[in-house]
Image: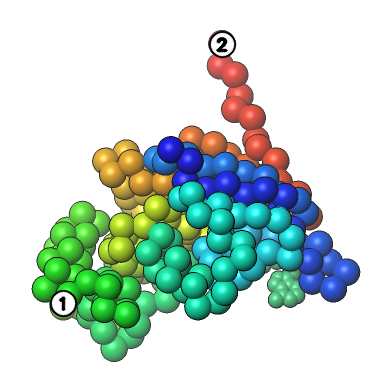
Amino acid sequence: MNILTLTEISKIYGDLKALDKINLTVEEGEWLSIMGPSGSGKTTLMNIIGCMDKPSLGKIDLAGQDISKLSSKELTIVRRDMIGLVFQQFHLVNYLTALENVMMPALVNKNMNRNEAQRKAKELLALVGLAKRLKHKPMELSGGEKQRVAIARAMINDPDIILADEPTGNLDTETSNMINELFMKINQERNQSIIIVTHSLELANLASYKYKIENGEFNMILPTIQF
Ligand code: ADP
Ligand code: MG
Protein backbone atom coordinates (compact mmCIF):
# COMPACT_ATOMS: atom_id res chain seq x y z
CA MET A 1 0.00 0.00 0.00
CA ASN A 2 1.08 3.52 -0.78
CA ILE A 3 1.68 5.46 2.46
CA LEU A 4 3.00 8.75 1.13
CA THR A 5 3.01 10.49 -2.25
CA LEU A 6 4.60 13.89 -2.85
CA THR A 7 3.75 15.50 -6.18
CA GLU A 8 5.78 18.50 -7.36
CA ILE A 9 6.37 19.82 -3.84
CA SER A 10 8.10 23.20 -3.70
CA LYS A 11 8.91 25.47 -0.78
CA ILE A 12 9.82 29.03 -1.58
CA TYR A 13 11.23 31.60 0.87
CA GLY A 14 11.38 34.97 -0.91
CA ASP A 15 13.74 34.34 -3.82
CA LEU A 16 15.10 31.09 -2.35
CA LYS A 17 13.69 27.81 -3.65
CA ALA A 18 14.34 25.62 -0.58
CA LEU A 19 12.55 22.70 -2.30
CA ASP A 20 12.12 22.50 -6.06
CA LYS A 21 9.34 20.25 -7.43
CA ILE A 22 9.99 17.16 -5.36
CA ASN A 23 8.31 13.89 -6.30
CA LEU A 24 8.42 10.87 -4.02
CA THR A 25 6.39 7.79 -3.16
CA VAL A 26 6.78 5.63 -0.08
CA GLU A 27 5.16 2.21 0.23
CA GLU A 28 4.13 0.57 3.48
CA GLY A 29 7.17 -0.94 5.21
CA GLU A 30 9.71 0.95 3.10
CA TRP A 31 12.73 2.63 4.64
CA LEU A 32 14.19 5.65 2.89
CA SER A 33 17.27 7.64 3.68
CA ILE A 34 17.96 11.18 2.59
CA MET A 35 21.46 12.65 2.48
CA GLY A 36 22.61 16.09 1.44
CA PRO A 37 24.79 19.01 2.51
CA SER A 38 23.79 21.48 5.20
CA GLY A 39 21.19 23.97 3.93
CA SER A 40 20.04 21.72 1.07
CA GLY A 41 16.41 21.51 2.26
CA LYS A 42 16.35 18.26 4.26
CA THR A 43 14.67 19.65 7.38
CA THR A 44 12.28 21.74 5.27
CA LEU A 45 11.19 18.54 3.52
CA MET A 46 10.82 16.60 6.77
CA ASN A 47 8.77 19.43 8.30
CA ILE A 48 6.39 19.34 5.33
CA ILE A 49 6.02 15.54 5.37
CA GLY A 50 5.64 15.73 9.17
CA CYS A 51 2.73 18.19 8.91
CA MET A 52 4.66 20.90 10.78
CA ASP A 53 4.87 23.15 7.73
CA LYS A 54 3.00 23.54 4.45
CA PRO A 55 4.44 23.47 0.94
CA SER A 56 4.24 26.61 -1.24
CA LEU A 57 3.20 24.44 -4.20
CA GLY A 58 2.37 20.80 -4.80
CA LYS A 59 0.30 18.00 -3.34
CA ILE A 60 0.87 15.56 -0.47
CA ASP A 61 -1.08 12.36 -0.01
CA LEU A 62 -0.71 10.64 3.35
CA ALA A 63 -2.39 7.22 3.72
CA GLY A 64 -4.89 8.10 0.99
CA GLN A 65 -5.75 11.57 2.29
CA ASP A 66 -4.76 14.79 0.51
CA ILE A 67 -3.27 16.82 3.35
CA SER A 68 -1.94 19.76 1.32
CA LYS A 69 -5.13 21.77 1.78
CA LEU A 70 -5.77 21.09 5.48
CA SER A 71 -5.90 23.85 8.12
CA SER A 72 -3.23 23.98 10.84
CA LYS A 73 -5.69 22.50 13.32
CA GLU A 74 -6.51 19.58 11.04
CA LEU A 75 -2.78 19.05 10.37
CA THR A 76 -2.13 18.76 14.11
CA ILE A 77 -4.49 15.80 14.29
CA VAL A 78 -2.98 14.16 11.20
CA ARG A 79 0.48 14.61 12.73
CA ARG A 80 -0.60 13.05 16.03
CA ASP A 81 -2.25 10.03 14.43
CA MET A 82 -0.03 9.31 11.43
CA ILE A 83 3.48 10.63 12.06
CA GLY A 84 6.18 9.71 14.56
CA LEU A 85 8.96 12.25 14.96
CA VAL A 86 12.56 11.71 16.07
CA PHE A 87 14.98 14.64 16.29
CA GLN A 88 18.74 15.10 16.63
CA GLN A 89 18.26 16.88 19.99
CA PHE A 90 15.80 14.25 21.36
CA HIS A 91 13.29 16.91 22.54
CA LEU A 92 12.21 15.01 25.64
CA VAL A 93 10.33 16.77 28.44
CA ASN A 94 12.86 17.12 31.28
CA TYR A 95 10.48 16.92 34.24
CA LEU A 96 8.74 13.76 33.00
CA THR A 97 10.01 10.20 33.40
CA ALA A 98 10.86 8.02 30.39
CA LEU A 99 7.51 6.29 30.76
CA GLU A 100 5.60 9.58 30.92
CA ASN A 101 7.49 10.98 27.93
CA VAL A 102 6.47 7.97 25.84
CA MET A 103 2.84 8.15 27.05
CA MET A 104 2.44 11.85 26.35
CA PRO A 105 1.49 11.85 22.64
CA ALA A 106 -1.19 9.24 23.39
CA LEU A 107 -2.78 11.41 26.07
CA VAL A 108 -2.92 14.66 24.10
CA ASN A 109 -6.57 15.29 23.22
CA LYS A 110 -7.39 12.11 25.20
CA ASN A 111 -7.09 9.83 22.21
CA MET A 112 -6.16 6.91 24.50
CA ASN A 113 -7.04 6.25 28.14
CA ARG A 114 -4.29 6.36 30.75
CA ASN A 115 -4.08 2.63 31.45
CA GLU A 116 -3.92 1.75 27.79
CA ALA A 117 -1.25 4.44 27.17
CA GLN A 118 0.81 3.15 30.09
CA ARG A 119 0.56 -0.48 28.97
CA LYS A 120 1.62 0.46 25.45
CA ALA A 121 4.44 2.77 26.59
CA LYS A 122 5.90 -0.02 28.76
CA GLU A 123 5.74 -2.41 25.84
CA LEU A 124 7.55 0.08 23.57
CA LEU A 125 10.21 0.88 26.18
CA ALA A 126 10.84 -2.86 26.45
CA LEU A 127 11.10 -3.04 22.65
CA VAL A 128 13.84 -0.37 22.66
CA GLY A 129 15.66 -2.12 25.54
CA LEU A 130 14.70 0.28 28.33
CA ALA A 131 12.35 -1.85 30.44
CA LYS A 132 14.56 -1.07 33.45
CA ARG A 133 14.58 2.72 32.93
CA LEU A 134 10.86 3.55 33.17
CA LYS A 135 11.19 5.96 36.11
CA HIS A 136 14.35 7.70 34.91
CA LYS A 137 14.16 11.32 33.86
CA PRO A 138 16.08 12.52 30.77
CA MET A 139 18.89 13.95 32.98
CA GLU A 140 19.46 10.44 34.34
CA LEU A 141 19.76 8.85 30.90
CA SER A 142 22.67 8.66 28.43
CA GLY A 143 22.35 10.20 24.96
CA GLY A 144 21.63 6.84 23.35
CA GLU A 145 19.02 6.03 26.01
CA LYS A 146 17.36 9.41 25.47
CA GLN A 147 17.13 8.73 21.75
CA ARG A 148 15.66 5.28 22.42
CA VAL A 149 12.98 6.92 24.62
CA ALA A 150 12.29 9.36 21.76
CA ILE A 151 11.95 6.46 19.29
CA ALA A 152 9.51 4.67 21.63
CA ARG A 153 7.55 7.93 21.94
CA ALA A 154 7.44 8.25 18.15
CA MET A 155 5.70 4.85 17.96
CA ILE A 156 3.03 5.27 20.66
CA ASN A 157 0.20 6.28 18.29
CA ASP A 158 1.06 3.60 15.69
CA PRO A 159 2.22 6.08 13.05
CA ASP A 160 2.01 5.32 9.35
CA ILE A 161 5.50 6.68 9.04
CA ILE A 162 8.42 7.56 11.33
CA LEU A 163 10.47 10.62 10.39
CA ALA A 164 13.93 10.99 11.90
CA ASP A 165 16.00 14.12 11.20
CA GLU A 166 19.69 13.32 11.88
CA PRO A 167 18.82 10.95 14.77
CA THR A 168 22.44 9.98 15.42
CA GLY A 169 23.92 13.44 14.81
CA ASN A 170 24.56 13.93 18.54
CA LEU A 171 25.78 10.43 19.36
CA ASP A 172 29.16 8.71 19.30
CA THR A 173 29.83 5.87 16.85
CA GLU A 174 29.11 3.00 19.22
CA THR A 175 25.83 4.52 20.41
CA SER A 176 24.91 5.37 16.80
CA ASN A 177 25.37 1.72 15.84
CA MET A 178 22.89 0.74 18.53
CA ILE A 179 20.33 3.24 17.23
CA ASN A 180 20.93 2.02 13.65
CA GLU A 181 20.18 -1.54 14.77
CA LEU A 182 17.05 -0.37 16.55
CA PHE A 183 15.70 1.27 13.38
CA MET A 184 16.48 -1.96 11.53
CA LYS A 185 14.55 -4.00 14.10
CA ILE A 186 11.54 -1.65 14.00
CA ASN A 187 11.48 -1.69 10.20
CA GLN A 188 11.82 -5.47 9.93
CA GLU A 189 9.74 -6.71 12.87
CA ARG A 190 6.92 -4.18 12.65
CA ASN A 191 7.00 -3.42 8.91
CA GLN A 192 7.24 0.24 9.94
CA SER A 193 7.81 2.82 7.18
CA ILE A 194 10.71 5.13 8.03
CA ILE A 195 12.34 8.18 6.48
CA ILE A 196 15.73 9.14 7.93
CA VAL A 197 17.78 12.22 7.15
CA THR A 198 21.39 11.49 7.99
CA HIS A 199 25.01 12.40 7.30
CA SER A 200 26.01 8.86 8.27
CA LEU A 201 26.64 6.67 5.23
CA GLU A 202 26.41 3.65 7.49
CA LEU A 203 22.85 4.52 8.57
CA ALA A 204 21.84 5.63 5.05
CA ASN A 205 23.02 2.33 3.61
CA LEU A 206 20.62 0.35 5.80
CA ALA A 207 17.60 1.83 4.00
CA SER A 208 15.79 0.22 1.05
CA TYR A 209 16.21 3.40 -1.00
CA LYS A 210 18.69 6.25 -0.77
CA TYR A 211 18.00 9.76 -1.94
CA LYS A 212 20.20 12.80 -2.25
CA ILE A 213 19.05 16.39 -1.98
CA GLU A 214 21.11 19.28 -3.28
CA ASN A 215 19.93 22.90 -3.61
CA GLY A 216 16.34 21.73 -3.12
CA GLU A 217 16.60 19.12 -5.88
CA PHE A 218 15.87 15.54 -5.06
CA ASN A 219 17.32 12.44 -6.73
CA MET A 220 17.51 8.74 -6.00
CA ILE A 221 21.02 7.38 -5.48
CA LEU A 222 21.06 4.25 -7.62
CA PRO A 223 22.41 1.14 -5.94
CA THR A 224 25.82 -0.04 -7.05
CA ILE A 225 25.41 -3.23 -9.07
CA GLN A 226 27.43 -6.11 -7.66
CA PHE A 227 28.78 -8.73 -10.04
P1 ADP B 1 19.05 21.31 5.90
O1 ADP B 1 18.14 20.69 6.88
O2 ADP B 1 19.31 20.47 4.69
O3 ADP B 1 20.34 21.76 6.51
P2 ADP B 1 17.00 23.38 5.75
O4 ADP B 1 15.84 22.64 5.20
O5 ADP B 1 17.00 23.65 7.20
O6 ADP B 1 18.35 22.64 5.31
O7 ADP B 1 17.14 24.76 4.97
C1 ADP B 1 17.11 24.84 3.54
C2 ADP B 1 17.25 26.29 3.12
O8 ADP B 1 16.07 27.02 3.44
C3 ADP B 1 18.40 27.03 3.80
O9 ADP B 1 18.99 27.90 2.87
C4 ADP B 1 17.70 27.79 4.92
O10 ADP B 1 18.41 28.94 5.26
C5 ADP B 1 16.35 28.10 4.30
N1 ADP B 1 15.27 28.22 5.29
C6 ADP B 1 14.83 27.25 6.13
N2 ADP B 1 13.80 27.67 6.89
C7 ADP B 1 13.57 28.97 6.53
C8 ADP B 1 12.64 29.96 6.94
N3 ADP B 1 11.70 29.71 7.88
N4 ADP B 1 12.70 31.17 6.35
C9 ADP B 1 13.61 31.44 5.38
N5 ADP B 1 14.52 30.53 4.94
C10 ADP B 1 14.51 29.33 5.49
MG1 MG C 1 18.45 20.11 8.89
Amino acid on which the number 1 mark rests in the picture: Arg
Q: Identify the image quadrant of residue 133.
A: bottom left
* Residue at 88% across, 69% down: 15
Comparing 206 with 58, the one in front is 58
- Mark 1 sits near ligand 2, with its Cβ under 8 Å away: no
- Quarter holding the C terminus is top right
Query: Please, what secondary structure does the residue beneath circle 2 have?
Result: loop
Per the image, the residue denoted by label 1 is: 114
Query: Whole-Å distance between the Cαs marked 2 and 1?
Result: 55 Å
Amino acid on which the number 2 mark rests in the picture: Phe
Looking at this view, name the residue that lies furthest to the top. 227
Q: How busy is the neighbourhood of tag 2: few (under 14 within 10 Å), some, or many (20 plus)?
A: few
| Residue 199 x, y percent position in the rendering | 58, 53
- Quarter holding the N terminus is top left
Evaluate if marks 2 and 1 touch, with contact meaning CB atoms under 8 Å apart. Answer: no
Looking at this view, name the residue that lies furthest to the bottom. 95
* Residue at 61% across, 24% down: 224
* Residue at 77% across, 54% down: 20
Ligand 1's image quarter is: bottom right
Looking at this view, name the residue that lies furthest to the right. 15
Query: Please, what secondary structure does the residue beneath circle 1 have?
Result: helix
Per the image, the residue denoted by label 2 is: 227
In the figure, is residue 225 to the left or right of 80? right
Whether 98 is drawn above or below 34: the answer is: below
| Residue 156 x, y percent position in the rendering | 28, 64
* Residue at 33% across, 41% down: 191
| Residue 140 x, y percent position in the rendering | 25, 79
Which of the colour schemes (rainbow, by chain, secondary structure, one colour) is used? rainbow
Can residue 193 be seen here? The reply is: yes
Comparing 46 with 132, the one in front is 46
Q: Identify the image quadrant of residue 126.
A: bottom left
